[in-house]
Image (cartoon, rainbow, N blue to C red):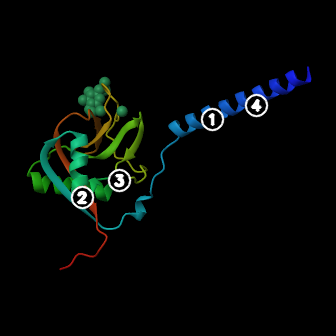
Amino acid sequence: MKLLTVSALLCGLFALTAAVEELEDVVKRTSPPFCTESSKLQQRVFIFVDKKLTWAEAESNCVSMGGHLASVHSLATHNLVRRLIKRRANRNSNAWIGGSDQSWESVWQWTDGTCFHYNKWLTGQPNNSGNQDCLQISLNGWEDRRCSCRQPSVCALVLFYPLVR
Ligand SMILES: *[C@@H]1O[C@H](CO)[C@@H](O)[C@H](O)[C@H]1NC(C)=O
Ligand SMILES: [Ca+2]
Ligand SMILES: [Ca+2]
């Protein structure tokens, strides 16, 4: 009788432990990811890539240059990227930048690991229409778009050393 109580108690404990682990797992999978404050970003160089790439190919291309698709944390940077596109493409092209909600639907993250606080979504965006998980910088704001679409992109490289003149 006593033994039975003990084992029942143990089973109860195990059940409790399992439940807690499951809960932690859920918390881990649903809580917003860790990120770095954008103030940690120092000087960056933005590069317009006039090649038709999917969002994943565009990010790989930026990584091969030592950077990431651009993260944008202010209206000033949004405008800077738009000016760059207009100057380099000689047209008002749309382009990939580094945001996506591929890991958690509607939780937007930047590929460079900075926090997604600022946004410049156009009215009604992001709408995830047909499962859109990648961030396109359009003329007056941002839209989510299917990641498999091919279009130009904008990379950003962090400068760790002052430029040598
Ligand atoms: C969703 O947004 C796209 C632009 O990203 C737009 O073309 C489309 O019409 C929108 N769909 C709906 C259902 O609002
Ligand atoms: Ca989405
Ligand atoms: Ca959309």
Could you tell which of marks 2 and 1 lies nearer the N-terminus? 1
The disc at residue 80 is 2
Q: Give x and y (percent) for residue 78.
A: 28, 54
Could you tell which of marks 1 and 4 lies nearer the N-terminus? 4
Residue type, numbered disc 4 = Leu
Residue 88 vertical position relative to residue 141 in the rendered view, above or below: below
Q: Is mark 2 within 8 Å of ligand 1?
A: no
Comparing labels 4 and 2, the label whose residue is closer to the camera: 4
Task: Give the residue number, with chain letter if any, for mark 1.
Answer: 21
- Structural distance between the alpha carbons of marks 4 and 2: 58 Å
Please tell me which residue is depicted at 29% across the width and 42% down the height of the picture.
Answer: 142
State yes or no: discs 4 and 3 in contact (Cβ < 8 Å).
no
- Structural distance between the alpha carbons of marks 3 and 1: 30 Å
Judged from the image, the secondary structure of the residue bearing numbered disc 3 is loop
The disc at residue 13 is 4
Asked whether residue 162 is in view, the answer is yes
The disc at residue 163 is none
Q: Residues within 10 Å of mark 3 (few under 14, many from 20)?
A: many
Comparing labels 2 and 1, the label whose residue is closer to the camera: 1
Q: Give x and y (percent) for residue 137.
A: 25, 45
Task: Give the residue number, with chain letter if any, for mark 3.
Answer: 112
Q: Residues within 10 Å of mark 2 (few under 14, many from 20)?
A: some
Could you tell which of marks 4 and 2 lies nearer the N-terminus? 4
